Amino acid sequence: MQHGLSGTAGLGRSGTESSDYREPEWPSNPQKSAPKFALNLANKESFGFLLTSDRLWTDSAAPPRKPAETRVSDDPSLTHVTLVWREGSQEDWLKFGKPIAERIVDRRQRIESYAAGQVFGLVRWASNDYGTVRSTLDIVRAVAGTAPCVPVPQVDPGGDLLLSVHGWPKVAQVFRLIDAIEASGIDPCDVAPDHWRHIHNRLSGREVPRGYSPARHRAWLQRKALLP
């Protein structure tokens, strides 16, 4: 499967699918290849803090922008996520998420918008001539426009940061945990926020996170129904 900007035809993924994505593979001897081919070196481990290519169309044939989508995505009460796809240098996509609005900025960039309370998983990868310089997964809950929030790169104005891991080994480990949740029939978008914080804290302490069972999920949904 090709991977690309979420929701962009022909480029790839958005939503809750299995983790078939891997870091881009580069030639083993970069001295014999073009400068854009970088060594696939993982960056540093996660910080130890705790949490409480080609055009898709010509300019003349670009798809028309829907006025309704433009108005929604410009709404300041929403959280806007900018996704950039420059294959081999910067690749952003969503592990999961259900945006209520999407807007194409240009052939390599789009903006997805989320209402307060929605949860999404943002994957960001980047490299230079020497190897991988960024491989991160941030799980963020969108907040209301007046609510306090944590700055998150490419997320405007920020959000409630539930989980943040750096380095491909930890990103891949969280992918496997997400896949296990999906295999049990649970949408990661609906998982209890405290479970993502639990995973972040356990990984920061180099411990194994507990699983997220259907029984635990039902308990969360019952509790959520009682919240104001």
Image (tube, rainbow, N blue to C red):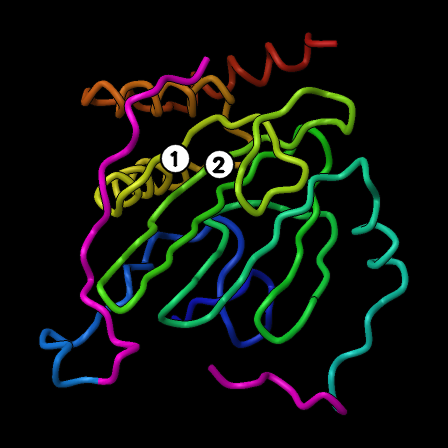
For this view, does 175 lie left or right of residue 139? left
| Nearer to the camera, 109 or 16 | 109
| Nearer to the camera, 68 or 77 | 77
The part of the chain drawn in magenta is 34-60
The answer to whether marks 1 and 2 mark residues whose Cβ atoms lie closer than 8 Å is yes
Residue 89 is situated, as x and y percent measured from the top left of the image, at 38, 67
Q: Which residue is mark 1?
A: 181
The residue at 15%/77% (across/down) is 30
Residue at the extreme left of the image, as rendered: 29
Q: Which residue is mark 2?
A: 188
What numbered label is drawn on residue 220? none
Label 2 amino acid? Answer: Pro
Q: Is residue 112 above or below residue 141?
A: below
Label 1 amino acid? Answer: Ile
Q: Quadrant of the N terminus?
A: bottom left
Of marks 1 and 2, which one's residue comes earlier in the chain?
A: 1
